[in-house]
Amino acid sequence: MRIAVFGAGYLGATQAACLAELGHEVVGVDVDPAKLATLDAGEVPFYEPGLGDVLRRNVAAGRLRFTSSHEQAAAFTGVYFLCVGTPQKEGEFAADLGYVETVIDTLAPLVTGPAVIFGKSTVPVGTAQRLGARARELSPAGTGLEVAWNPEFLREGFAVQDTLHPDRLVLGIDRHRPGRAEEVAREVYAQLLAEDVPFLITDLATAELVKTAANAFLATKVSFINAISEVCEAVGADVTVLADALGYDVRIGRRFLDAGIGFGGGCLPKDIRAFMARAGELGADQALTFLREVDTINMRRRSRMVELVRHTCGSLLGVRVAVLGAAFKPDSDDVRDSPALNVAGQLQLQGASVNVYDPKAMDNSRALFPTLGYAPTAADACQGADVVLVLTEWSEFRKLQPGDLDAVVRNKVLIDGRNCLDPQQWRGAGWTYCGLGRP
Ligand code: UDX
């Protein structure tokens, strides 16, 4: 099939490359010429394991190319995927739908025949219905232009796997005008459906809500274990052992029960806020007041970490802090709302001298926090350190041995913000080890 993907950011670039990998002929559309040139050359403008191979293979095979021309994309096909960002609005909880609306306003007038726009961006419930009406109004194709919603659940670090082997596919269609969306989607995803990936057809609102509810649940699970972690600290219990024990209950499950400095990134924090804002507009704000607590618990993890460093070192003034990890999670170079970088910034603002190292997120970190110190390796960051903080659980840090740092640091003090190291090993080597929610 011929498919045009609008937005060549994290979601769009992955979607375009993976649709080409499924055998389709794909054109990716974006307004950023630098990004397009990078992608056309077979380079991924961000770090995502495995995506470069898929991109290069399909660009070389002629199945994938990129353009800034909406006209070309509209003329190329009648199957469109909407993959632009929906960031948090400046100074508000609500999502900014500007990019999504711009694509509809630009594309719809160019569509002259039957066509389907599949929205993948995370949007407040009710958006798809509204965009559908707007698209029909603006397009010469009128009711021949359909808007359906096909939310994306990919995780950074696993983007290719999650797109080519998803847990499920969800498709929201306009029940008042069912049209061809389901039939087209079945053709687009034929290969996945042949592999028995569950395929749920819903109305538009349900499809939009599935995505926001999934992220709200994940955020709640992380904040739940972090709240329990605070109680563990108060009584000297161990949250990691507790999480293992809870996890054996299949109703609960062990995943997303890692206590630490909490969640960040481009999705969970802004999505729970946009969800609360939308519920408020719908008069259902009471239903989601608990998400404010989820957010508060999460943000408290960051200040708790800063306090722990202050308490451990006696003061922050002039203390040399090594920060290992800046990305919001491992296997990503994304520092949007990163707890690690937030902690590093707070420590510096309160008088500490901070040296950061991250395997992939150095450039993004420098751009966001240019005043922090940056070191080329973990050992360099730890040079003369009074305290070492592990704030993102990269495998490089999980594998660290006390012997790697013994001769480098000034004081053998380690605070493990992700509970990813073995306390006994470090204590056995003469280090002071502190985890979060562990004795
Ligand atoms: C998330 C959703 O998982 C994905 O389905 C959705 O499409 C986009 O948002 P992502 O932002 O890539 O994906 O990150 P995720 O793996 O969900 O982790 C989110 C944050 O939670 C990270 O900061 C991570 O460090 C933190 N986390 C996760 C914990 O603190 N503890 C855990 O046990 C799990």
Image (spheres, rainbow, N blue to C red):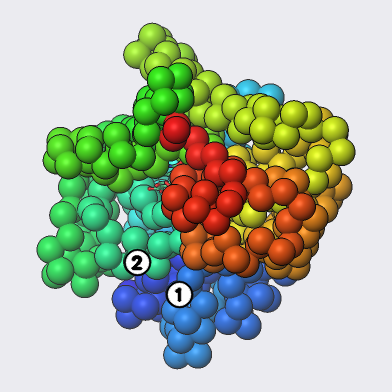
Asked whether the residues under the numbered discs 2 and 1 touch, taking CB atoms below 8 Å apart as contact, a structural biologist would say yes
Residue identified by numbered label 2 = 161
Say what amino acid the circle numbered 1 marks: Gly
How many numbered circles are shown?
2
Label 1 sits on residue: 50
Q: Quadrant of residue 244?
A: top left
* Residue 374 appears in view: yes
Q: Nearer the viewer, residue 21 or 135?
A: 21
Secondary structure beneath disc 2?
A: helix
Q: Quadrant of the N terminus?
A: bottom left
Whole-percent x, y for residue 291 in the image: 43, 21
Helix, strand or loop for disc 1: loop
Neighbor class of circle 2 (other Cα within 10 Å; few <14, some 14-19, many 20+) is some
The x and y percentages for residue 434 are 54, 39
Classify 20 as above or below 11.
below
Up the image or down, 316 lies above or below 165; here it is above
